[in-house]
Image (cartoon, helix red, strand yellow):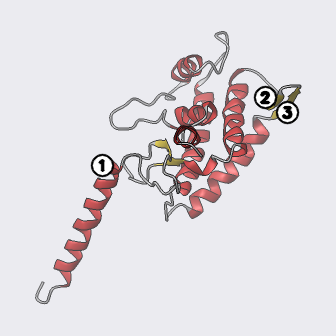
Amino acid sequence: MTKDASRTALSPSPAAERVLAFVNTRAIDGSREELLDGAALTEWLRREELAAPASLVTDADAAAARELRDALVCVLLAHAGEPDADQSRADAEEHLRRSAELYPLAPVITASGVHLAPTSGGVPGALAQLLAAAADVALRGDWMRLKACRNPPCHLGFYDRTRNSSAAYCSPNRCGAQVAMRSYRSRKAKQEAEKPGA
């Protein structure tokens, strides 16, 4: 594999970028919650070209979008090796199964290929497009490279560009360093507490 081909293989596809754009709508590091209510969801869907301008979007739609997003974040945390994700991952996977029933997709077959498309419009169709993007990432073999940062205050979604897909933090210099420092302080505190006469 050439150097350029290797670089391309470790770059996110448009579908992966769409999934990451969705999971990163959460309030992270002082950013605003982008799916707060119907108006905010409308703005995000239009910016991402996922819904027609005339689509009616309610606060209940925004709540459903946040639930779908949170389930995806939980799965991406599991991809990053989050040790405490087992039960929440099972709940998230169940939610994603139910979402696939609520926001169905159908294969569209043409001479140039096959892709999944929503069977409805509006917000259900937009959320189905997000599920279609996740399916596309999986079919490309990149699903395990989509991760959420294991640093608890962060959980930013990111694409793991490491060759062995071993990244656990969105930034080793920021979040990775914060986790290492917390771990170091915890060990030091434990050692101090275990000293005789402490």
**Residue corresponding to mark 3:** 107
Query: Is 12 placed above or below 37 here?
Result: below
Check if mark 1's residue and mark 3's residue have beta carbons within 8 Å. Answer: no
Check if mark 3's residue and mark 2's residue have beta carbons within 8 Å. Answer: yes
**Residue corresponding to mark 1:** 173
Point 44% across, 31% down: residue: 33
- The Cα–Cα distance between marks 1 and 3, rounded to whole angstroms, is 42 Å
Query: Is 51 placed above or below 70 here?
Result: above
Q: Which mark is residue 117?
A: 2
Q: Nearer the viewer, mark 1 or mark 3?
A: 1
Point 51% across, 53% down: residue: 163
Q: Is residue 113 left or right of residue 34?
A: right
Task: Count every numbered label the image shows and give the total.
Answer: 3
Query: Is 153 placed above or below 29 here?
Result: below
Q: At which x and y percent is residue 149? A: 44, 49
Q: Label 1, secondary structure: give it.
A: helix
Q: Quadrant of the C terminus?
A: bottom left
- The Cα–Cα distance between marks 1 and 2, rounded to whole angstroms, is 39 Å
Q: Specify the amino acid type for callout 3.
A: Pro
Q: Label 2, secondary structure: give it.
A: strand
Furthest toward the left, the residue is 197
Q: Specify the amino acid type for callout 1.
A: Asn
Q: Nearer the viewer, mark 1 or mark 2?
A: 1
Q: Is residue 36 left or right of residue 100?
A: left
Q: Nearer the viewer, residue 147 or 23?
A: 147
Q: At which x and y percent is residue 76? A: 55, 50
